[in-house]
Image (spheres, helix red, strand yellow):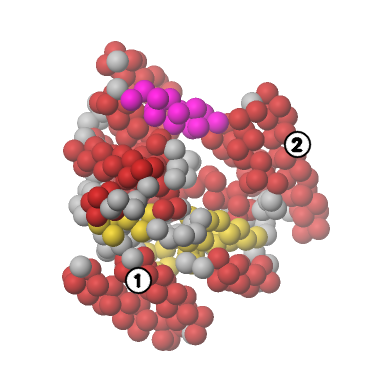
């Protein structure tokens, strides 16, 4: 615990000193980030204490014990660097641990990026208070950006601190909680600065593969079936969004006047909503996305959806080409993370072109294992 807080104080000091030349807003941003992280670390309780406490609800105890099983599986079977993460619990008493601000130009699908000490650049800016996130979002809107503010139930500190289990994700379904833990620990396997799409797609694939292997090892087919049903629904939604993203990209490449682009942009978003309604009429479980679709649509919101899924098929191919060996898979992905962003994306796109045949081979092998 002393070492952890030394890390926090050193990191905080460096972050604050590094911002003195860049203005008060930047200092305020890092101050809230340090303060928010400090509050989380300060309120951690050992999970062993929570589960032994007679005042803890049976539901909470059961959920935390399940997380301990998932954590052990992540370390032993998925070879993920769990270290001392997820041994403690924090009740945040709010629905999200943080709120991310995502922004994109009015006529571009390329999101704005922010650069940070130690971790490089990312296509979002996180706040521990929703009001702070909304205030910053308003400032970006005044600068002409499309902006989206979304709640976050968990995040990884990339090994800087021992991440706790949070109340914001403990209430998820068993499949959802396990997937999230696999996803967040995957970020500690590799991290490519200034490439949110690569990082999130990698972690999304690891969560999928983790749950597939969980089912095979534990015989808990229900958890994987639940995840697959959710993922298939998610893929339908993502495919629909990606289709309209492409239409937007095509529009923004034209030489039309801004007024005409705005009119056609609005029309594309209207078409997206209408096609969603038509799809939902035959796939009523897509109602899970009603809230997302009912709120304002813009470039920033669309780009945030794609970031988590764009290269998932490529990672499926890379694992299959390494015969399902996770050690070799992680090594191959680490080599990708060390390449320049453009080259990395080119390699991933080539992998996706090889995808259908390789993915089918991996699927047949999996069926033989069952």
Residue 316 higher or lower than 39, as above or below: above
Query: Which residue is most to the top?
Result: 368
Count residues near mark 1 (Cα–Cα under 10 Å), then give few for <14, some for 14-19, many for 20+: some
Q: Which span of residues is magenta-colored?
A: 220-233
Q: Which residue lies under the disc numbered 2?
A: 274
Mainly helix, strand or loop, the magenta region? helix
Element assignment for label 2? helix
Dividing the picture into quadrants, the one containing residue 221 is top left
| Percent of width and height locating residue 170 | 40, 47
| Percent of width and height locating residue 163 | 30, 57
Residue 10 higher or lower than 184, as above or below: below
Query: At x 42% / y 63%, what residue is drawn?
Result: 121
Residue 158 higher or lower than 208, as above or below: below
Q: Using the image as rendered, state which of residue 332 and residue 75 is in the foreground.
A: 75
| Percent of width and height locating residue 229 | 49, 27
Q: Which residue lies under the disc numbered 1?
A: 38
The verdict on residue 88 being magenta is no
Task: Report the quarter where the N terminus lies.
Answer: bottom left
Element assignment for label 1? helix
Query: Which residue is most to the front?
Result: 54
Label of residue 206 in the image? none
Residue 155 visible in the snapshot: no
Residue 299 visible in the snapshot: yes
Query: At x 60% / y 52%, what residue is drawn?
Result: 301
Q: CA distance from mark 1 to mark 2?
A: 45 Å
Dividing the picture into quadrants, the one containing residue 139 is bottom right
Report whether 4 appears left or right of 276: left
Query: At x 43% / y 49%, what residue is drawn?
Result: 169
């Amino acid at each position: 615990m002393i070492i952890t807080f030394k890390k926090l104080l050193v990191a905080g000091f460096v972050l604050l000193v590094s911002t003195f030349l860049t203005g008060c807003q930047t200092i305020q941003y890092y101050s809230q980030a340090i303060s928010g992280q400090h509050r989380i670390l300060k309120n951690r309780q050992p999970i062993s204490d929570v589960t032994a406490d007679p005042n803890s609800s049976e539901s909470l105890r059961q959920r935390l014990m399940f997380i301990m099983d998932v954590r052990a599986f992540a370390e032993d079977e998925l070879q993920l660097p769990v270290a001392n993460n997820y041994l403690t619990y924090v009740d945040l008493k709010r629905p999200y641990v943080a709120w991310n601000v995502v922004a994109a130009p009015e006529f571009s699908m390329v999101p704005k990026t922010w650069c940070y000490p130690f971790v490089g650049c990312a296509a979002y800016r996180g706040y521990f208070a929703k009001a702070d996130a909304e205030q910053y979002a308003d400032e970006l809107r005044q600068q002409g950006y499309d902006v989206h503010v979304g709640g976050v139930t968990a995040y990884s500190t990339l090994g800087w601190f021992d991440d706790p289990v949070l109340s914001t994700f403990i209430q998820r379904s068993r499949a959802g909680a396990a997937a999230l833990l696999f996803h967040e620990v995957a970020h500690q396997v590799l991290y490519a600065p200034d490439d949110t799409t690569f990082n999130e797609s990698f972690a999304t694939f690891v969560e999928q593969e983790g749950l597939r292997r969980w089912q095979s090892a534990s015989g808990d087919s229900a958890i994987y079936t639940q995840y697959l049903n959710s993922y298939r629904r998610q893929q339908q939604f993502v495919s629909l969004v990606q289709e309209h993203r492409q239409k937007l990209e095509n529009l923004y490449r034209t030489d039309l006047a801004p007024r005409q682009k705005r009119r056609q942009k609005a029309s594309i978003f209207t078409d997206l909503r209408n096609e969603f309604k038509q799809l939902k009429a035959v796939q009523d479980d897509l109602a899970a996305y009603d809230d997302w679709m009912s709120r304002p649509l813009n470039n920033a919101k669309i780009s945030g959806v794609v970031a988590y899924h764009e290269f998932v098929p490529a990672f499926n191919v890379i694992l299959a080409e390494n015969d399902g060996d996770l050690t070799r898979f992680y090594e191959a992905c680490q080599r990708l993370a060390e390449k320049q962003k453009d080259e990395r994306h080119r390699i991933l796109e080539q992998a996706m072109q090889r995808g259908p045949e390789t993915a089918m081979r991996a699927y047949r092998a999996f069926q033989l294992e069952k």
